[in-house]
Image (tube, helix red, strand yellow):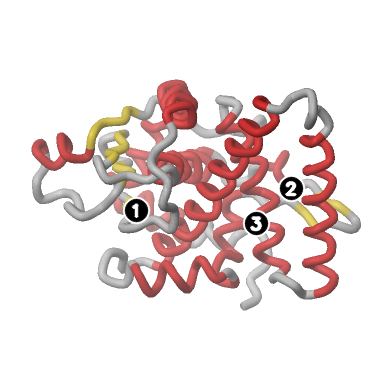
Amino acid sequence: MHFQLSSIESADPNEVLDRILYAWALKHGVTIEPLEELIKKWPDRYQHQALGVADFLNGVIGISKNAKIDTLAEEIAHFAIELRYTGDYNDYEWITYFPLLGKRFNIRQCLNRIHRTPEYFEVKYHYEKIYSKDIDFRKEALAKILSKEIVYLFQVKEIIKKKQSKYESFKNIRIGMDDFIYFLNRKLGISTVAKNDIERTMKILARMIVNQESIKPKYSYREFGVARIKEHHIWPQTQEKESDLLYKFGDMSF
């Protein structure tokens, strides 16, 4: 279970974005309810001051009346990450290499490198009394990066939609500029290589979510869905068996 304790966003929830995220959740078997109603059902289960919660065991997202524009996006991000994390260990189609721009990672590779990002250290500080396992800090940090990409991509799409005639080529220009910025960041050390490569992966996943696409891996040989997440979190022996697989793929260096 993961929580959004606070938000860096000041904007209130966007009805259009929320409809998109509700549709994606429905497609992936996730229900969304007011957090206040969930607290009535299970008063001892949730952080009452939280803006949002992703409850994997119950397959539900709770959203507070004080939520911000990125709250639902962050809880959706948690489910997307968990679906990928528990659904398939390999995600081979995500490992795409670029001679100049780096590579896209699968979810486990992202989690393996997330400790090199500012988001990880922020989460370690703000969630020190919430989580005890390092994997939970890593997933929280990755979800915050993904939620930023979801909100940003939605806002860009809205600009293009409103000013289509003026910005009909803006989308392709922006993608090209993003690639160039990632290249400069990597070569000039403006940002960490790990964060740039993670953001590239999260940008792809964000597009799939905003476009309401299924995120099931093409080459998944395991059960995929909320039921698989529940199984993973219910059975301690399953978690123990899978715990060492976080670092099975990708770089082990710190």
Amino acid on which disc 2 is placed:
Ile
Residue named by callout 3:
198
Residue at 89%, 58% in the rendered image: 100
The reply to whether dot 3 and dot 1 touch (C-beta < 8 Å) is no
Q: Is 162 rendered above or below residue 141?
A: above
Find residue 4 and name its label. Answer: 1
Q: Is residue 153 above or below residue 23?
A: below
For mark 3, give the secondary structure.
helix
The answer to whether residue 249 is left or right of residue 171 is left
Q: Circles 2 and 3: CB distance less than 8 Å?
A: no
Front one among 245 and 3: 3
Of the two numbered discs 2 and 1 on the same chain, state the one appearing first in sequence.
1
Q: Secondary structure at mark 2?
A: loop
Badge 1 crowding class, 10 Å Cα cut-off, few under 14, some 14 to 19, many 20 or more, is many
The numbered dot on residue 95 is 2
Residue 178 numbered mark, or none: none
Q: Position of residue 179 (x, y in %)?
A: 81, 51
Q: Position of residue 181 (x, y in %)?
A: 80, 58
Q: Position of residue 171 (x, y in %)?
A: 77, 35
